[in-house]
Image: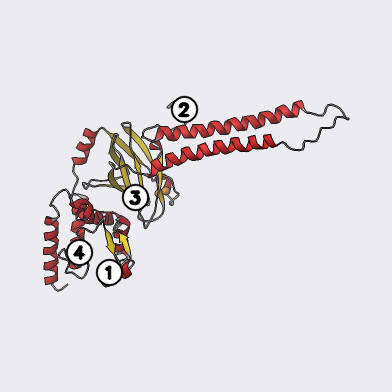
Amino acid sequence: MGSIPFLPPSASSVSGEVDAFYFFMVAVTAFFSLLVFGLVVFMAVKYRRKSDQDQPRAILGSVPLEIVWTAIPFLIGMVMFGWSAKIFFTIMTPPEDAIEMYATGKQWMWKIQHRNGKREINELHVPVGQAIKLKMTSEDVIHSFFVPAFRTKMDVLPGRYTTTWFRPTKVGKYHLFCTEYCGTKHSGMIGWVYVMQPEDYQKWLQGDSGEGTLAQRGEKLFNELGCANCHRTDGKGRGPSLVGVAGEMVELERGAKVLADEEYLRESILNPQAKLVAGYQGIMPVFQGLVSEDQLLQLIEYLKSIGKTQKAPAAKPAAPASRTAATAATVQGKGL
Ligand code: CUA
């Protein structure tokens, strides 16, 4: 179908089915439009008034006809509903094997962070054949992340995370657009997605990733912002220890419970009073406006790295934990 003008290339695991559904709807609509207009013309000619005495016979309804023209559109409607729901669920459900990346929309650019610490602007490099899950948020207003070749589009909202995923199937360079009017240079908020062979992607990923992984940067921030002073790893700080918290249920005041997912962690950094952990006082300062969305993602990556979700594979948390404790000790020594 690449020869159809205006149709973007089809380069993801869902794009073929989205196109098929689209053409099915176009075909159904075209068929009925032609049928109706054809019949209008045909009837107008066939049953035109042939003489002054020509009087049409009154029609008093027909039950079989009513049933037919109710049932057929109903069935076609249900096929459209069922098919589109199936595609919708596929697009909305990231597969288990998806690798995670972070995108932040900002007037007027796309900032991408890879978990190993590599960052890019208005460019997104991904390996072919691999499912990619993008966790997205905005620094300012609503943007929308759209890659026509993948047939995926998702709004990017300030103050919360949205997720989109795709599995690119063809190596190449594809347009990335913002599809939500977001100010003067909305039309310039465009970029490129580079789909690479896995080996090339690995090479690209290893090239100067700068100051360590996202989790390492998050840990650095955790210390710089003074989080480690109170959130001591021995659990004796003024705030709860955050080791093993990410991805777990957290107990709040009055017996309520909440899952410590990215959304909860983000809220608890920006507005700590919103959901206080049971047994702790609301003394943590508000970090709203003090940390950027990119930094929040780094902090969350760090919390995930010392959280339940990441703890199983290695005994690695010991190192950051002891360093955190050491920092806490030094800072406390200064009477802060
Ligand atoms: Cu961002 Cu339009």
Task: Tell me which numbered mark, 3 or 2, is placed earlier along the sequence.
Answer: 2
| Residue furthest to the right | 53
| Label 2, label 4: how far apart the Cα atoms are | 58 Å
Q: Quadrant of the N terminus?
A: top left
> Is residue 58 positioned above or below 260 on the image?
above
**Of the residues shown, which amino acid type is indicated by label 3?**
Met
User: In terms of image quadrants, where is residue 93?
Assistant: top left
Q: Name the amino acid, label 4.
A: Ser
Callout 3: 10 Å neighbours few (<14), some, many (20+)?
A: many
Query: Which label sits in the foreground, 2 or 1?
Result: 1
| Residue hosting label 1 | 278
- Looking at the rendering, in which quadrant would you find the C terminus? bottom left
Look at the numbered disc 1 and give the secondary structure of its residue: loop
Q: Earlier in the sequence, mark 2 or mark 4?
A: 2
Side of 39 relative to 146 (left or right)? right
Quick one: label 2 or label 1, which is nearer the N terminus? Answer: 2
Q: Quadrant of residue 178?
A: top left
Residue 295 in percent (x, y) is at 26, 56
Q: How far apart, in angstroms, are the residues tagged by discs 3 and 1?
A: 30 Å
Badge 1 density bin: few <14, some 14–19, many ≥20, Cα 10 Å: some
Question: Closer to the observer: label 3 or label 1?
Answer: 1
Is residue 214 or residue 75 the one in the foreground?
A: 75
Question: Which residue is more in the foreground, 203 or 35?
Answer: 35
Asked whether the residues under the numbered discs 3 and 1 touch, taking CB atoms below 8 Å apart as contact, a structural biologist would say no
Instruction: Give the structural element (helix, strand or loop) at label 2.
Output: loop
In the structure shown, which secondary structural element does the residue marked by tag 4 occupy?
A: loop
Q: Which residue is mark 4?
A: 241
Query: Which labelled disc corresponds to residue 4?
Result: 2
